[in-house]
Image (cartoon, grey):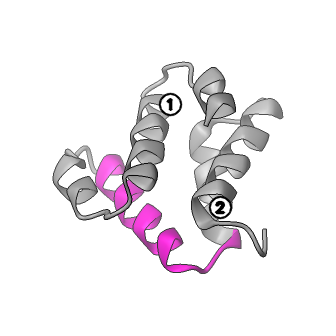
Amino acid sequence: MEGIAPPLALLLSVKKAMEKGQSVRQGVLHYIKKDSDPFAGTVTQWLALLQQGQDAQNFLKSVESVHRRTLLLVLERGLRGESIHAVLNRL
């Protein structure tokens, strides 16, 4: 998704995956594979921490943008099985 802000590309990737009946994780992985911007690296590190069962809160403190942190927090809720589609639509 060239030409749009990386967090928006991530949001759209996850939203599209969910609308296809796929998981939040699949949407995040699709974004990571398609985008090579620095934010994709941040998302990769964040997802790795979660997959290892670690708390990502300290890592999120290193993300400077409050908007990016908020998006990752919402996606973390989705990865835990909470419904986040309405929240993604509002974002």
Residue drawn at the location 61% of the way across and 37% of the way down = 91
Q: Residue at x 78, y 42 (%)?
A: 16
Name the N-terminal-most of marks 2 and 1. Answer: 2
* Distance between the alpha carbons at the discs numbered 2 and 1: 15 Å
Which residue was labeled with disc 1?
A: 78
| Residue behind mark 2 | 31
Query: What predominant SS class does the magenta segment belong to?
Result: helix
User: In this picture, is 3 found above or below 86?
Assistant: below
Q: Vertical placement of 82 versus 21: above or below?
A: above
Residue 78 sits inside the magenta stretch:
no
Q: Position of residue 24 (x, y in %)?
A: 60, 38
Q: Is residue 38 toward the left or the right of residue 7 in the image?
A: left
Q: What x and y, as percent, mark residue 77? A: 43, 30
Judge left or right: residue 78 versus residue 90.
Answer: left
Q: Which residues are magenta?
A: 34-51
Q: Pointer 1: residues within 10 angstroms few (<14), some, or many (20+)? A: some
Q: Quadrant of the N terminus?
A: bottom right
Q: Residue at x 56, y 44 (%)?
A: 25
